[in-house]
Image: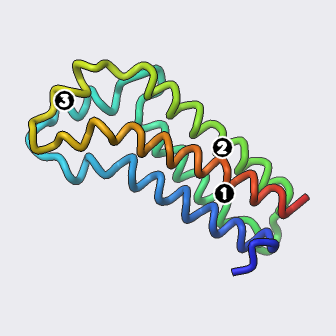
Amino acid sequence: MNLSDPADAGKLAAVVAAAVAVVVFAPLVLITGAGDTLGAYYAAGPFGLTAVGLLAVVAAVVFLSVGRPHTDALTLSGVGAVVALSVVLAAVAWVLTIDSTVLFSFPAEYAWIENHRWAVLAGALALTAVSGLQARTVL
């Protein structure tokens, strides 16, 4: 993989975006028997955690489009950087506004959920960094 090539850097950014989406939606698969609490967890904040995951999926699609025929790599890199920044801003808003009652009300076997918010935020920051790297390769 040649990271000085915009298409290869776009593929790396798409992989990071997909990983962020997987991290965001992992509790839906891994947690059972806490439907109302899980719903409140994903709905917390002004945009909710679902917005973070969906924006990460959009970022993956945008970055995979870089280097395809009939696409403008510069435009897509800019759009990808804006979407990645949106992912980070939505994640920060969610982390800052999630109610601690919801966060600590999961059953004891799902205590790892208390650290899930930091994994989401770290992934969003990594996506923003990689999108900046990808945009730099185009310029």
Image spot of residue 74 (x, y percent): 86, 57
* Quarter holding residue 101: top left
Residue at position x 39%, y 46% in the image: 24
Question: From what the image shows, is residue 32 above or below residue 138?
Answer: above
Residue at position x 18%, y 40% in the image: 111
The quadrant of the rendering that contains the N terminus is: bottom right
Q: Are marks 2 and 1 in contact (CB under 8 Å)?
A: yes
Question: From what the image shows, is residue 100 above or below residue 65?
Answer: above
Residue highlighted by disc 1: 62
Question: From what the image shows, is residue 125 above or below residue 37?
Answer: below
Q: From mark 3 to mark 2, how far is it between C-alphas? A: 28 Å
Task: Please state the total of marks drawn on the protein image.
Answer: 3
Residue highlighted by disc 3: 37
Residue situated furthest right in the rendering: 139
Residue at position x 47%, y 20% in the image: 46
Q: From mark 1 to mark 3, how far is it between C-alphas? A: 33 Å
Residue highlighted by disc 2: 83
Residue closer to the observer: 127 or 37: 127
Image spot of residue 50 (x, y percent): 41, 38
Mark drawn on residue 45: none
